[in-house]
Amino acid sequence: MSIRARLSRIVRANRAARKSAPADPVQTVEAAHAQQVEHLDRARRSVADLAAQRRRVEVLTHRARADEQSWNRQAEAAVAMRHDDGAREYLRRAIEAGRRAETLTAQHRTLDSQVRQLEDSLGRLERRVEDSRLHLQSLRAAHGAARASLEMREAATAAGREAVGAEAAALAAEREVRRLEARAAAYDELAGTDPDSVQVREAFEQLETGTAADARLEQLKRRQGIEPPR
């Protein structure tokens, strides 16, 4: 198989492993909270844009009112000067400015109502996102504590298994020590006796037979689930 084929096979295996791996619930909650924050930012921008539009309409309304007052003053001056045509033109412009101001005032009231409603909705959304953030922090803490507890229990279980294995090895070592000590004692007891004599051979045969019987007895006990004496 070529290197390229092997790499493609590894990549496909990694993708399949990622797809089959169970989703982390905490990461799912984090992703949902991130979407909430994104929606909140978008809502804030919308409220800010609408408030800016309300401010522009407010400025235009003040300007229209100022124009209306200015045209009215000029109309009064024209009347005082017996300039009826000029006064009539100024009054016409004042009326137009007044109508424009009324239209802008109505538009401002509508925008102001919309902004207030959106600000109330935004406040509720902010509180909901804050509650979600606090809940996420609580979940992270609980998840971390649960994971640490699980890892501790797994470590304790592994240590327990190792302890059982070490204890069994220690018992086997103790039996070996007793066997060696018994053989050494037998040598001491039979010191001075002919090593090829029948008595010596029988003594060693009995010792070895007893040791073999002890070993088989331990095997039978382990098969039957009987704990060896400590």
Image: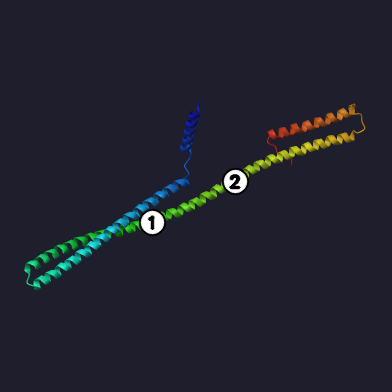
Tell me what residue is drawn at x 80 percent, y 38 percent.
178
The residue closer to the viewer here, 203 or 111, is: 111
Mark drawn on residue 40? none
At which x and y percent is residue 154? 59, 44
Q: Please, what secondary structure does the residue beneath circle 1 have?
A: helix
- Which residue is depicted at the point 72% across and 38% down? 169
Q: Residues within 10 Å of mark 2 (few under 14, many from 20)?
A: few
Q: Nearer the viewer, residue 40 or 196?
A: 40
Looking at the image, residue 207 sits to the left or right of residue 159; the answer is right
Q: Residues within 10 Å of mark 1 (few under 14, many from 20)?
A: some
Residue 190: where, in percent of width, then height? Answer: 90, 33
Residue flagged by tag 1: what amino acid is it?
Glu
On screen, residue 200 above or below 108: above
- Regarding residue 14, the answer to whether it shows in the image is yes
Query: Which element type, helix, strand or loop, lies under badge 2?
Result: helix
- What is the CA distance from the residue labelled 1 to the residue labelled 2? 40 Å
Kindly identify the amino acid type of the residue bearing the numbered disc 2.
Arg
Residue beneath label 2, please?
153
Query: Where is residue 144 shown, x and y percent of the image?
Result: 53, 49
Question: Is residue 114 in view?
Answer: no
